[in-house]
Image (tube, rainbow, N blue to C red):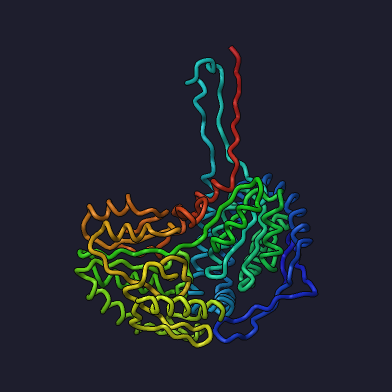
Amino acid sequence: MEMIVGGKKVNKPKTLKVYNPYNGAIVDEVPEGDAMDVENAVNLAVEGKKIMKELPLHKRVEILYNTGILLEKNEKRLSKIINEEVGKTIKDAQAEVIRTAELFKYAAEEAKRIHGETLPFTSLKGSENKRGYYILEPVGIVGAITPFNVPLSLAAHKVAPAIAAGNAVIMKPATQTPLNTIILGELLLEAGMPEKAISVLTGRGSVVGNALVKDPRIRFVSFTGSVETGENIAKNAGMKKLGLELGSNSALIVMDSANIDKAVAATVGGGFSLAGQVCISVQRVFVHEKVYDDFVDRLVSKVQSIKFGDPSKEETEMGPVIDEENAVRIIDWIEEAVSEGGKMLTGGKRDYTLVEPTVLVDTPLESNIMKKELFGPAVALRKVKDLDEAIELTNESVYGLQAGIFTQNIKEAFFAAEKIEAGGVMINEGPRYRADFMPYGGYKKSGIGREGIKFAIEEMSELKVICFDIGE
């Protein structure tokens, strides 16, 4: 496939291969972009942002809505691409395309609600003759750097609000999964996006990504990925706005009054969908001692029934991780936890990139799987004596994206909601839950800013105050 620079397809002599994580087959090749491609894209976006700012709001709404319709029409093509380049099961790939289409339609509706407010200047002594208001204007150019795990929907979470707010957009997809983003760029153009206002640059993050981050003409950088890369972006971005969603090692608390079946289902769904490669995957589970044995027995039984293997087959529930390097790391972390005193109840093996769904108990608190982000199909359990201990362990993390608690005690639910240090606390639901309209982001090293269409539109806008002196 060709990348898109200012609405035009561009090829390069040097290319990067895109591999199927499950079998290592080459899916396609994309151009290996460089700093000059970034320069060209930004130069065109400087013109594109003027076009976008002058575009009537109903035109932006039309672009967003039409993109949603085109995504639905291209569902089979996109699902196949996501299945092949991400290793996501075909059912999950189809769900992602439909989710993305709905996300663009929702952005079209939310765009109609972009407005400012009047300001009460006369409440200030000496300003009796002042009248005024504030409005929201586009920041100009948004750089959107997206990850491999949910590539289409997470691109939409950046691109849709950027367009709604009236910005030009330059997308930089993950090196492993650029194909679906290129197709999204093509569909945006088909939907009516001004050519100079949209680019999809393929290439290495160290080259293309860094050049985007450092360019002073890009006013907002939205990034989803690792803490290390996020910190590097913060150091190199200069004077611009940032949205950084940097992952987690999400905790789930199961109290003695919990609905155990629901808690087990949330752990399985949250810990093993997409092979655990989601920022808010269930990773750490703290279970009250009174229900611990029951919970563990039911969980192991459910995990052992997960159908994992070829993601292109309809019956498959879990596919591979993104590459062999990560598969090796995941197994290393599991084995480290066992060597330090943890017990493995199921899983713990791999075949190339296919890692068995794994359950660990008595997991040492100092092990990597308890302290860092695993991004793999394993959950680590610990027994706790009460809610205070569970919350203390939950908060013993450099991350704070989302957490969950299962309890039928309303006091425990409110106490946990107030005391857990995270951007979202799910009650009687796992931390994996996300609605695309809610403010999504985290505390501590989980990032800066919030996604969610309404909230991202606000972050991708500038506030301008207009004040009139109407005289005596």
Q: Quadrant of the N terminus?
A: bottom right
The residue at the point 51 percent across, 55 percent down is 447
Horizontal relation, residue 244 to residue 274: left or right: right
How many marks the image carries: the answer is: 0
Examine the image and state in which quarter residue 346 appears.
bottom left
Q: Is residue 60 above or below residue 376?
A: above
The residue at the point 23 percent across, 60 percent down is 386
The residue at the point 40 percent across, 72 percent down is 271
Residue 383 location, x and y as percent? Answer: 27, 69
Residue positioned most to the front: 340
Residue positioned most to the top: 472
Examine the image and state in which quarter residue 471 appears.
top right
Horizontal relation, residue 452 to residue 62: left or right: left
Nearer the observer, 26 or 130: 26
Residue 367 location, x and y as percent? Answer: 42, 70
Residue 249 location, x and y as percent? Answer: 43, 65
Q: Quadrant of the C terminus?
A: top right
